[in-house]
Image: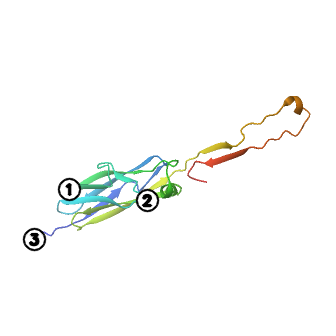
C-alpha cells in the first residue's frame, strides 16, 4: 500500500474588509486549514503590505510559524495599525488620504508544497480637523473718542487655515 502525500492549505475569513480611522487598528480573524494528510510546518506572511502596517497578534510581528496537523484549523488575528494622520509623513500620509489600504496574507508550507493567499482591505475612514493661526497683527486698536463719527474703522488680518483631516 502506497500512501501519497497530499499538501493543501486554505485561508478563509468571515470578512475581507474592516474599517478604521487613521490612528486606529483594523482587525481580521483568518483561519488556516491544513487539508493535506501530513503535518505541515506553515509560515504565514504578508505578500502585500506597502507601508508594513500589518502584524499577527500571536507573534506581534509580520511573520508567524506553526505546525498544523492534517485537517486542523488555526485562527490568527491580523491587525493593520494605521498611523495617526497628523504625525504621518511622506508616503504614509499619502496612503492615509486614499479610501482603502490592502494587505495580502499568505500561508505556505516551509517546503513550498502548498500555499494560499487572502487579500484583506481596510476602509480608511475620513477624519476631520482644522487649525487656524493669525499671522502678524492680532488685535486692532481703535480710539473710540476720536473715531466715533468715522465710519471707516476697517482692520485687515491675515489668517492661516490648515486642514488637519485626511480628506478635502
Q: Earlier in the sequence, mark 2 or mark 3?
A: 3
Q: Earlier in the sequence, mark 2 or mark 1?
A: 1
Instruction: Left or right? Give the position of 167 relative to 139.
Output: left
Q: Residue 104, how many percent across, how many down?
A: 38, 61
Instruction: Left or right? Give the position of 154 relative to 86.
Output: right
Identify which residue, 21 or 32, lies in the foreground. 21
The residue singled out by tag 1 in the image is 67
Residue name at image x 65 percent, y 43 percent: 133
Report the number of discs: 3
Identify which residue, 64 or 32, lies in the foreground. 64
Instruction: Left or right? Give the position of 72 relative to 142.
Output: left
Residue 6: quadrant of the picture: bottom left
Q: Residue 54, how many percent across, how many down?
A: 38, 54
In the picture, the quarter occupied by the C terminus is bottom right
Residue name at image x 36 percent, y 55 percent: 13
Identify which residue, 132 or 1, lies in the foreground. 132
Residue name at image x 72 percent, y 46 percent: 158
Q: Is disc 2 surrounded by few (<14), some (14 to 19) or many (20+) residues within 10 Å?
A: some
Q: Secondary structure at mark 3?
A: loop
The residue singled out by tag 2 in the image is 102
The residue singled out by tag 3 in the image is 2
Q: Secondary structure at mark 2?
A: strand
Amino acid at each position: 500500500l502506497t500512501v501519497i502525500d497530499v499538501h493543501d492549505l486554505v485561508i478563509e475569513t468571515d470578512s475581507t474588509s474592516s474599517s478604521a480611522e487613521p490612528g486606529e487598528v483594523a482587525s481580521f480573524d483568518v483561519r488556516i486549514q491544513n487539508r493535506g494528510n501530513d503535518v505541515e510546518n506553515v509560515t504565514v506572511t504578508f505578500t502585500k503590505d506597502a507601508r508594513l502596517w500589518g502584524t499577527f497578534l500571536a507573534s506581534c510581528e509580520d511573520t508567524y510559524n506553526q505546525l498544523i496537523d492534517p485537517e486542523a484549523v488555526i485562527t490568527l488575528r491580523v491587525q493593520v495599525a494605521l498611523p495617526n494622520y497628523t504625525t504621518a509623513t511622506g508616503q504614509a500620509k499619502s496612503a492615509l488620504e486614499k479610501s482603502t489600504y490592502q494587505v495580502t496574507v499568505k500561508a505556505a508550507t516551509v517546503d513550498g508544497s502548498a500555499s494560499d493567499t487572502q487579500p484583506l482591505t481596510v476602509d480608511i475612514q475620513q477624519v476631520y480637523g482644522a487649525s487656524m493661526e493669525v499671522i502678524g497683527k492680532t488685535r486692532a486698536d481703535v480710539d473710540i473718542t476720536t473715531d466715533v463719527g468715522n465710519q471707516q474703522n476697517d482692520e485687515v488680518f491675515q489668517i492661516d487655515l490648515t486642514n488637519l483631516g485626511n480628506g478635502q
